[in-house]
Image (tube, rainbow, N blue to C red):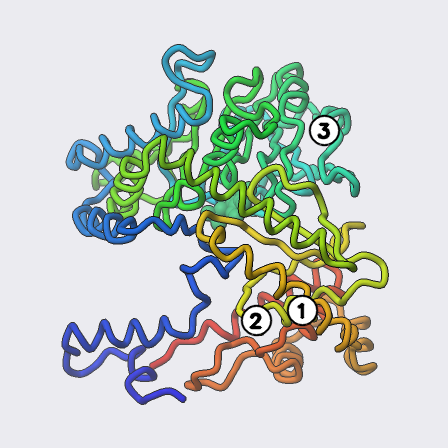
Amino acid sequence: MIDESRVEAGALPANGVPAERVLEEVRELRASDAPTHGGRLFAYVYDPAVPGLDELAAAAHRESAHVNGLDPTAFPSLLAMENALVGAAGRVLGAGPGTTAPDVVGSVTSGGTESLILAVKTARDAHPEIAAPRIVVPSSAHAAFAKAAHYLRVALDVVPVSPDTLRPDPAAMAAAIRPETVLVACSAPSYAHGVVDPVAEIAAAAAEAGVRCHVDACFGGWTLPYLRRLGQPVPPFDFAVPGVTSISVDLHKYAYAPKGVSVLLHRDATLRAPQYFAYADWPGYTMINPVIASTRSGGPIAAAYATVRHLGDDGYLRLAAVTRDAVAGLADAVRAVDGLRLMAEPESTVVCFTATAGGPDLFVLVDELTARGWHTQPQLSYAGLPASVHLTVTAAVAPRVAEFGPDLAEAVTAARAAGPVRLPAELTAVVGALTPEALTPEMVVGLAAGLGLGGEPGSAAGPLPERMALVNTVLDAAPSALRERLLVEFVSLLQRPTW
Ligand SMILES: Cc1ncc(COP(=O)(O)O)c(C=O)c1O
């Protein structure tokens, strides 16, 4: 149940609400969210479980929340913190004084997606003579590359990954490079499966063709170097690799900073130059933007600065060791259960598993895990790769690992007992016959209601049903264009103003 005040929270009240009450409202709203802390949510959040860190980051954020990154000369504090974060990221990724990449420069962006869009924009704008620019990515590359290609009108050449290694063949990546190619990209590691692409070979092929090579280390750029220092085999992926021209790393992931901070690094300032947007042809201030946003809050940058300095190199090494052990424990738990198999041997901080033939229905299993307080991320089948379950593992998971194994085994038994989701015949027929073009908003409303999606306006129930297996099975049966359309229509149903 929900009280009136929560519904009213969306409205502009006639009379201001006292501060304490407003905070209470925020807390009430937050109560229906997935748990950001406590090591039971395996996506979206990165929790080091370090006492006092949240408070420190919040205090630093408060100091700089109203500072504007629009003009670094007006707010040199922000420039100093940004330069320090870029230096830290460079050091972690094999650049800086005394390395083979001493001239690395970079910018702080709002997140991985912005870093990738800017990497693509920079590569595109370095070649104004190419009328129809293209980029080459493995099929496992983050969806943000497709978004960048779409926003920037750059063609996307996708090289499939092997169903066995989940990596692209470097020869196939090389073969995909054309005269119009402005960028070749790869991941260290991929989000979905957590495997590191053959960066050295791909970068060599790109260099030979005279094309830039971006390494998307948004996810793993802050952990792989520490895992390597701990003795784990990590293939070369950073600026030590010849041919790598830019790297992205998200501080709001494994640097454990609050959301809104990523770093995009280029091997030198010449490579970075086309990243800037400058405009003086209007009566206002000359706008010089290194990133997509113009006005930028200093809050996230200050929070990241405080986080990185407080944890320090030794802190990240310790957290990487804790996370490595948690990954090993979770992978063992998966191996111990009949009917599941790891998609890949973990080599970073992802554990990803699928069902073996005759194993449990994965979507039912995900619901059974949710019922036991474990929030995992189902991944739909795609281009010959089976549906899977993704676990992003952070340091906060470590104290939970011993509880996970028995719960996983129990959840598998329950999923087997429940049996696989069987789509009602009429639903199978509808999904089979649907095309993205034929889909109308009314059809989506009907389908969403039939699947228990959307919730009641003003009700305390979330927009998703407690059990998602049916929804996931429907989506899994749909081709990707239809998945996109269905989910866009659904999200657009959710995005309605409350008056
Ligand atoms: C490898 C990789 N690249 C890019 C991104 C996009 O990052 P963001 O969600 O911060 O935009 C992610 C997010 O998970 C990622 O894992």
- Give the residue at x 72% y 34%: 168
The reply to whether callout 2 and callout 3 are in contact (CB within 8 Å) is no
Residue position for label 2: 372
Which secondary structure, mark 2? loop
Measured as percent of width and height from the top left, residue 396 is found at: 44, 52
Residue position for label 1: 410
Whether residue 148 is visible: no
Q: Amino acid at mark 3?
A: Met
Front-lying residue, 130 or 351: 351
Measured as percent of width and height from the top left, residue 425 is found at: 83, 81
Question: Crowding at label 2, few (<14), some or many (≥20) Cα neighbours within 10 Å?
Answer: some
Residue position for label 3: 173
Left or right position of 335 against 214? right
Q: Is residue 358 above or below residue 47?
A: below
Front-lying residue, 131 or 116: 116
Of mark 2 and mark 1, the one earlier in the sequence is: 2
Measured as percent of width and height from the top left, residue 8 is found at: 29, 83
Q: Is residue 33 above or below residue 323?
A: below
Q: Amino acid at mark 2?
A: Arg
Q: Is residue 473 above or below residue 221?
A: below
Of circles 2 and 3, which is in front? 2
Disc 2 from disc 3: Cα separation = 42 Å
